[in-house]
């Protein structure tokens, strides 16, 4: 079979299906990490968990119930909180972490992004208007 045929077949198969999203990618990455760890651990339970994670990721990717999968993924992504950018785009999150510092407002806990290396900065909280100083 020619290579173009394979690609066309894959595209056909993917049509109307969920494909990859953050939740499936995370499950797959976790499964691969567990398989790697299991080279040392040689645990039956760990290999079963890895298999279940792979099956779950596969089932999500091939699912045709797009609405349900999108809702699940939304809940998952929300639950990540500050980890979210690291799952979505690690390279971008890394650049972001190098260029900016996130400081919590002492009054309301709102996180504010300030450029790094500016020394002492005066911050006005965008949420509660409280003014405070922090080292960036
Ligand atoms: Zn505040």
Image (cartoon, grey):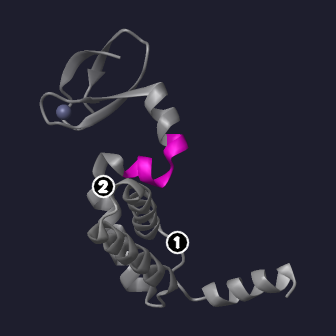
**Residue 81 versus residue 59 in the image, above or below:** above
Between disc 1 and disc 2, whose residue precedes? 1
Residue on which the image places disc 1: 20
| Marks 1 and 2 close (CB-CB < 8 Å) | no
Crowdedness near tag 2: few (<14), some (14–19) or many (≥20) residues, C-alpha within 10 Å:
few
Front one among 128 and 45 = 45
Q: Residue shown at 27%/36% (left/top)?
A: 111
Q: Kindly indicate the quadrant of the structure image that contains residue 16.
A: bottom right
Q: Please tell me whether residue 90 belongs to the stretch shown in magenta.
A: yes
Q: Is residue 89 toward the left or the right of residue 82 in the image?
A: right
Question: Magenta segment range?
Answer: 84-92
Q: Which residue is mark 2?
A: 80
Percent coordinates x, y for residue 129 in the rendering: 21, 30
Give above or below for 5 relative to 129: below
Q: Is mark 1 within 8 Å of ligand 1?
A: no
Q: Is residue 78 above or below residue 59?
A: above
From this view, report whether residue 27 is shown above or below residue 131.
below
């Amino acid at each position: 079979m020619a290579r173009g045929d394979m690609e066309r077949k894959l595209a056909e198969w993917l049509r109307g299906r969920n494909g990859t999203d953050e939740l499936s990618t995370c499950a797959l990455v976790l499964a691969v990490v567990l398989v790697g760890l299991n080279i040392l651990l040689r645990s039956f339970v760990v290999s079963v968990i890895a298999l279940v994670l792979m099956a779950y990721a596969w089932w999500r990717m091939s699912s045709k119930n797009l609405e349900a999968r999108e809702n699940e993924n939304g809940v998952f992504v929300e639950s990540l909180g500050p980890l979210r950018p690291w799952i979505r785009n690690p390279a971008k999150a890394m650049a972001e972490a190098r260029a900016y510092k996130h400081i919590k407002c002492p009054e309301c806990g709102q996180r504010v992004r300030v450029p790094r290396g500016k020394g002492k900065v005066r911050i006005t909280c965008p949420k509660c208007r409280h003014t405070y100083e922090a080292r960036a």
